[in-house]
């Protein structure tokens, strides 16, 4: 069904793909400068030197957050302050001028406001927001380049995995690691994602949805998926791998920990989680802006497949998923102050 708005989009068949929108935000900053100014420009292609730092040495980071249409029809952002903080961390780690959190939030707000017609109707999806920062000046030798470009584009999205929220079929990678201890796994650096493509495509060709990565020190502890954090539930306790330095500190991960402990009264432990613990869990699920909270139904490790909870979404996973969605959609009171109304972001 095509819902009548000023843009013609079939909201019912949205996937997780790029949809061209009206505008995007663009700002530049010299290496020794501060992030300021910038403006909205029509959505479209950009020009880059072939010697740009991002193209040659991977000097690039990004973020991912969403705007939602609530049950009352308002447009809200979910914890964009956490994305701003993580962007500040990631930029610093890659020798990019540290992102100013207020500047980031203001740019996100302006981009969403200008593309408000692309926020799907209530319950039909969300507007995915993709801020990126790249080294755009040229350099031949390996070094931080002299100028950086910050852009934000948006795209209306539906579910990340095709077929809705059916439990995922995951492969534990024993051949590849995602990130090294003391490396850049805890930054949202583009290189982490290029490293994950080969294992991901290999797993997909074998019929899996995604990959679970183990730690790069002894390969016993689970870290995360290529694009989501991992949780297990057993005997009344939720556990998720502690932030070791090689795991991305997910906004959804933190939100799930708070929802479980503060709303559902389920104890949460951030600790070492061995792969053997995962295989014995009553429920396993993954979390992320794109996947929200998605159950894991099958895990293949060293050629053997374990079915979790009869390949069904468990009741704890379901409760957590429903609670976070209800907060994001304005269906329940937000006890944490996570919701930023798009028209009042700085009045909080
Ligand atoms: C590697 C990785 N881990 C975890 C996450 C989940 O983070 P968040 O909940 O902030 O989206 C993502 C996705 O953004 C990711 O790419």
Image (cartoon, rainbow, N blue to C red):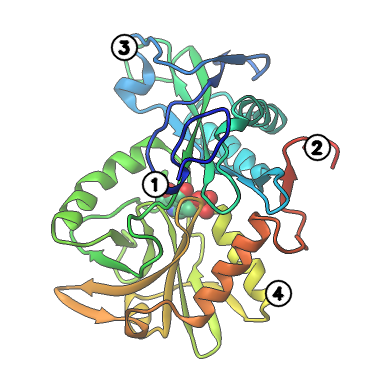
Residue 311 vertical placement versus 95 (above, below): below
Is 201 left, or right, of 6 in this rendering? Answer: left
Q: Which residue is mark 4?
A: 263
User: Residue 81, position in %: x, y?
Assistant: 68, 43
Helix, strand or loop at mark 2: loop
The answer to whether one can see residue 248 in this image is no
Work out which quarter of the rendered image holds the C terminus and state it: top right
Q: Are marks 4 and 3 in contact (CB under 8 Å)?
A: no
Dot placed on the residue nearer the N-terminal end, 2 or 1: 1
Work out which quarter of the rendered image holds the N terminus and state it: top left
Q: Which residue is mark 2?
A: 344
User: Residue 311, position in %: x, y?
Assistant: 32, 79
Q: Quadrant of residue 341?
A: top right
Dot placed on the residue nearer the N-terminal end, 1 or 3: 1
Q: Which residue is mark 1?
A: 13
Q: Which residue is mark 3?
A: 51
Q: Given this view, does label 4 or label 3 mark the residue nearer the observer?
A: 4
Dot placed on the residue nearer the N-terminal end, 4 or 3: 3
């Amino acid at each position: 069904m095509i819902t009548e708005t000023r843009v013609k989009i079939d909201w019912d068949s949205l996937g997780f793909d790029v949809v061209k929108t009206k505008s995007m935000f663009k700002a530049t900053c010299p290496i020794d400068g501060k992030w300021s100014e910038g403006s909205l420009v029509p959505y479209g292609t950009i020009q880059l030197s072939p010697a740009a730092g991002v193209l040659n040495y991977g000097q690039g980071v990004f973020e991912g957050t969403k705007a939602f249409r609530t049950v009352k029809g308002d447009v809200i952002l979910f914890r964009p302050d956490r994305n701003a903080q993580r962007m500040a961390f990631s930029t610093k780690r890659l020798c990019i001028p540290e992102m100013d959190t207020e500047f980031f939030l203001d740019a996100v707000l302006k981009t969403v406001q200008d593309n408000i017609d692309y926020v799907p109707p209530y319950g039909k999806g969300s507007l995915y927001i993709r801020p990126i920062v790249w080294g755009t000046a040229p350099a031949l030798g390996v070094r931080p380049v002299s100028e950086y470009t910050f852009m934000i584009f948006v795209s209306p999205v539906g579910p990340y995995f095709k077929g809705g929220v059916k439990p995922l079929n995951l492969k534990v990678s024993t051949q590849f690691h995602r990130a090294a201890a003391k490396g850049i796994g805890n930054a949202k650096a583009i290189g982490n994602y290029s490293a994950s493509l080969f294992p991901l495509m290999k797993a997909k060709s074998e019929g899996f949805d995604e990959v679970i990565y183990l730690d790069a020190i002894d390969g016993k502890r689970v870290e995360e998926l290529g694009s989501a954090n991992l949780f297990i539930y057993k005997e009344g306790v939720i556990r998720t791998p502690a932030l070791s330095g090689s795991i991305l500190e997910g906004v959804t991960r933190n939100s799930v920990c708070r929802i479980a402990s503060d709303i559902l009264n389920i104890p949460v432990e951030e600790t070492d989680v061995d792969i053997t613990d995962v295989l014995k869990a009553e429920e396993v699920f993954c979390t992320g802006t794109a996947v929200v909270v998605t159950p894991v139904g099958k895990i293949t490790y060293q050629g053997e497949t374990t079915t979790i909870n009869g390949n069904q979404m468990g009741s704890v996973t379901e409760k957590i998923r429903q609670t976070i969605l209800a907060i994001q959609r304005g269906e329940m009171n937000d006890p944490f102050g996570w919701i930023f109304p798009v028209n009042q972001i700085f009045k909080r």
